[in-house]
Amino acid sequence: MTKTQRQHRIGELIDHDVISTAAQIVARLHDEGIAATQATVTRDLQELGTVKVRDEHGARRIVMAASPKLAPAPLDHLRRMMGEWVVSVESSANLVVVRTPPGCAHVVASALDRSALRGVLGSVAGDDTVLVIAAEEHGGAALADDFRALAGLKTLVDGKAQGASQ
Amino acid sequence: MTKTQRQHRIGELIDHDVISTAAQIVARLHDEGIAATQATVTRDLQELGTVKVRDEHGARRIVMAASPKLAPAPLDHLRRMMGEWVVSVESSANLVVVRTPPGCAHVVASALDRSALRGVLGSVAGDDTVLVIAAEEHGGAALADDFRALAGLKTLVDGKAQGASQ
DNA sequence: ACATTTTATGCATAGAAAGGGATAAAAATG
DNA sequence: CATTTTTATCCCTTTCTATGCATAAAATGT
């Protein structure tokens, strides 16, 4: 079973049942023949964007955060997604244009939505392009540089790519 | 530089210039500080779905295939995409419903479009769901089994998941 | 405030992916 | 058809990702 499939199953479990610890999830998965330790499940919960709350009976419960920003996925997740899918980053004033292969823009946009990266007001994904609106105090150019760093692209200096040749 | 970024640059080169061999691409990339050998570039061209044609002057030229089906990507590419993103597969008559995490359906649909997998009439991608229409002679159930094998999911027998517990 | 439980993380390891070298196989050329 | 050029692939190495173990740190319960 792949990590994505396991995470999907975990998402179903916490939506459906009252679950309060990672160990409970480990046990449920084990009942279904899915092997994972508490450490792995905890990382999964982080990537899924879950929070622990009190339900209406006062019991503690793990749930999906109401908004992705309330439980951002680790920056490593964003770095992996951008490293895998982003092919170029350009900016104009407070806008950043991120290019991906066809059909992959939504993966990058989703990862951006679920990250804690600062300076992002919002984003819109097409087929192979993500348009990102930068917060005014951060600016498109600075945000574009952050994106390049995450995607393993060269930063620009005076409009030119900078850094040692690979 | 990532593989995706290199492949994007290769796509730009063959769109823009008359290029007839992988070695020419290796040289162009080298001029831009991008290291890759003929073997790697050849694999890239396969994944990109390119063909070699005669242009209007009779010169041989590598171009993107007019239709993905004319130069399908290796099955390994589809397997990697489905292994990474598909969380479940279900079928009804001649339809197959493939579930992915939010925002990832297009990646799977694009990989399906660009594969040589038989029995697929067409597909439509939503946010987290790909609807695949199976060719009549192949059938949705058989196609769903093919998808499960590619995605590393268990096959079904009489509606039940089959295979040793992991 | 303290004890217990739970989560988070450093480190190590296994497996997968990517890529290079060499060369077999296929394609192109003459 | 022979020769040359180019592509494809096998095998190997390196790098990266995912995961488990152990335990430190944080959260929870009393």
Image (cartoon, coloured by chain):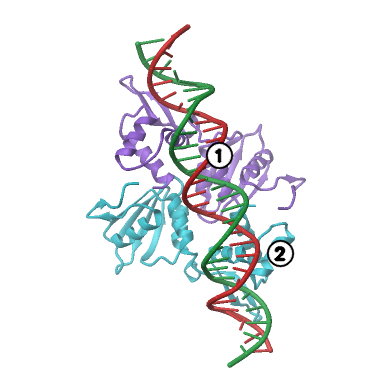
Chain colours: A cyan, B purple, C green, D red
In the image: residue D18, left or right of residue B18: right
* Quarter occupied by residue A143: bottom left
Res B76 label: 1
Residue A37 seen in the current view: no
- Taking the spot 58% from the left edge, 63% from the top edge, the residue there is A44
* Quarter occupied by residue A16: bottom right
Question: Residue B128: percent from the left, percent from the top?
Answer: 55, 53
- Taking the spot 44% from the left edge, 50% from the top edge, the residue there is A85
Label 2 element class: helix
Say few, some or many: other residues with alpha carbon within 10 Å of mark 2 (under 14 / 14 to 19 / 20 or more): some
Viewer-proximal residue, B36 or A57? B36
Res A28 label: 2
Residue B56 seen in the current view: yes
In the image: residue A67, left or right of residue A163: right
Chain at tag 1: B
Question: Residue B140: percent from the left, percent from the top?
Answer: 66, 40
Q: Amino acid at mark 1?
A: Asp
Q: Amino acid at mark 2?
A: Arg
